[in-house]
């Protein structure tokens, strides 16, 4: 990996941590992000400041769907032989409110990335983010990569499944070395404020009730950010050798077991020393009651080994949240 590594969504939650890990290893990272205001731009700016402390980090405020701008960035740093595509419009629930950014960023943006990689001589590997949401109405737990994914429950999930199909076509047509990663409920320091853990902490510290959907009958494969980053970089270092007439690899990256939502909340309560006021609500449109990942393929193929238990992860999360927000 002597050439530059491009990371899209570089100042997003997962992109920031992935960029930081590579920079600490001495890698040259070309970071791309449009800094959109879907959530706090200040949080993104604060992440960016930490990344820009490294001289081997080169940042471009560009939307990945802007083909001409992305081509200029690519040419400025060529050759680029490795890409980690984490740039996307995130959030299941927001896709019910404003669907258009999901098409622009997740479909057109990924199309631009595929084309740039396709024409790079000796391109080595494209790793891209998918999501556990692609499993949709699938009720067979744990989710395995060979299960059906043709019943997405949100536009967000549909765009991510589209990415998998687009990647497959480029693998087949052009033998593009590409790997998809289905993330399962990633949490940790510097996370997105729209995610449940942050909503819960903010409300609990303000003495306000927390909204609990499906009357608390929810379970998630909560996966700590450090484990996800290790999985991304493990996948990046192991490009697939599968033939063009075979499926390109797509892996689950989750924890090794699922946690109930109520247990997650209880762990937060203990760490904050606050008993939450709870507002129980029905299941929201686009949500699934439970997720759990079969990670055996990632363990086998690139040594994925998530090790952070929920108690440890929440301890780190709460400590960061208090420090970042100036709370005792």
Image (cartoon, grey):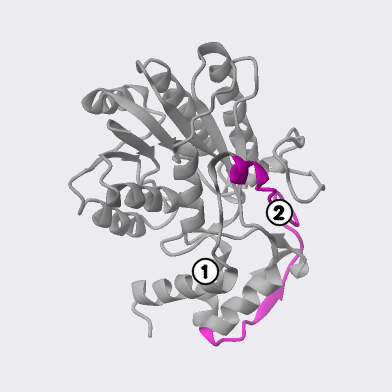
Residue 278 is inside the magenta segment? yes
Secondary structure beneath label 2 = loop
Residue 267 falls left or right of residue 11? right
Residue at 61%, 60% (x, y): give it.
Answer: 222
Residue 20 is inside the magenta segment? no
According to the image, label 2 marks what residue?
292
Residue 106 at x, y percent in the picture: 51, 34
According to the image, label 1 marks what residue?
313
Q: Is residue 107 visible?
A: no
Q: Which residues are magenta?
A: 272-300
How many labels were placed on the picture?
Answer: 2
The foreground one among 109 and 297 is 297
Residue at 75%, 57% (x, y): give it.
Answer: 289
Q: Please determine whether, in this image, residue 151 is positioned above or below residue 304.
A: above
Residue 42 at x, y percent in the picture: 32, 59
Quadrant location of the N terminus?
A: top left
Label drawn at residue 165: none
Secondary structure beneath label 1 = helix
Q: Is residue 194 visible?
A: yes
Residue 297, quarter of picture: top right
The foreground one among 38 and 158 is 158
Residue 278 falls left or right of residue 43? right
**Label 2: few (<14), some (14–19) or many (≥20) C-alpha neighbours in 10 Å:** many
């Amino acid at each position: 990996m002597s050439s530059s590594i491009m990371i899209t969504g570089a100042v997003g939650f997962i992109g920031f941590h992935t960029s930081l890990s590579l920079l600490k290893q001495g890698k040259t990272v070309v970071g791309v992000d449009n800094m959109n205001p879907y959530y706090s731009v200040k949080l993104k700016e604060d992440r960016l400041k930490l990344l820009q402390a490294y001289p081997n980090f080169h940042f471009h405020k560009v939307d990945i769907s802007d083909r001409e701008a992305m081509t200029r960035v690519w040419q400025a740093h060529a050759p680029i032989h490795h890409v980690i595509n984490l740039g996307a419009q995130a959030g299941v629930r927001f896709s019910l409110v404003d669907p258009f950014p999901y098409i622009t960023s997740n479909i057109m943006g990924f199309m631009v990335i595929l084309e740039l990689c396709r024409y790079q001589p000796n391109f080595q590997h494209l790793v891209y983010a998918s999501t556990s949401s692609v499993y949709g109405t699938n009720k067979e737990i744990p989710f395995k990569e060979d299960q059906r994914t043709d019943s997405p429950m949100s536009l967000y999930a549909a765009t991510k499944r589209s990415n998998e199909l687009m990647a497959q076509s480029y693998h087949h047509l052009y033998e593009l070395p590409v790997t998809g990663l289905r993330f399962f409920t990633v949490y940790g320091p510097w996370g997105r404020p729209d995610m449940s853990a942050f909503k819960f902490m903010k409300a609990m510290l303000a003495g306000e009730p927390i909204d609990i959907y499906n009357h608390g009958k929810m379970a998630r494969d909560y996966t700590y950010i450090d484990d996800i980053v290790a999985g991304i970089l493990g996948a990046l270092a192991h490009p697939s050798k599968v033939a063009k007439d075979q499926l390109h690899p797509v892996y689950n990256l989750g924890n090794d077991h699922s946690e109930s939502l109520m247990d997650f909340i209880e762990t937060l309560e203990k760490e904050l020393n606050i008993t939450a006021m709870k507002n129980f609500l029905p299941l929201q449109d686009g949500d699934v009651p439970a997720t759990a990942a079969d990670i055996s393929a990632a363990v086998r193929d690139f040594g994925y080994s998530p090790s952070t238990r929920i108690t440890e992860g929440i301890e780190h999360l709460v400590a960061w949240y208090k420090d970042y927000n100036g709370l005792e």
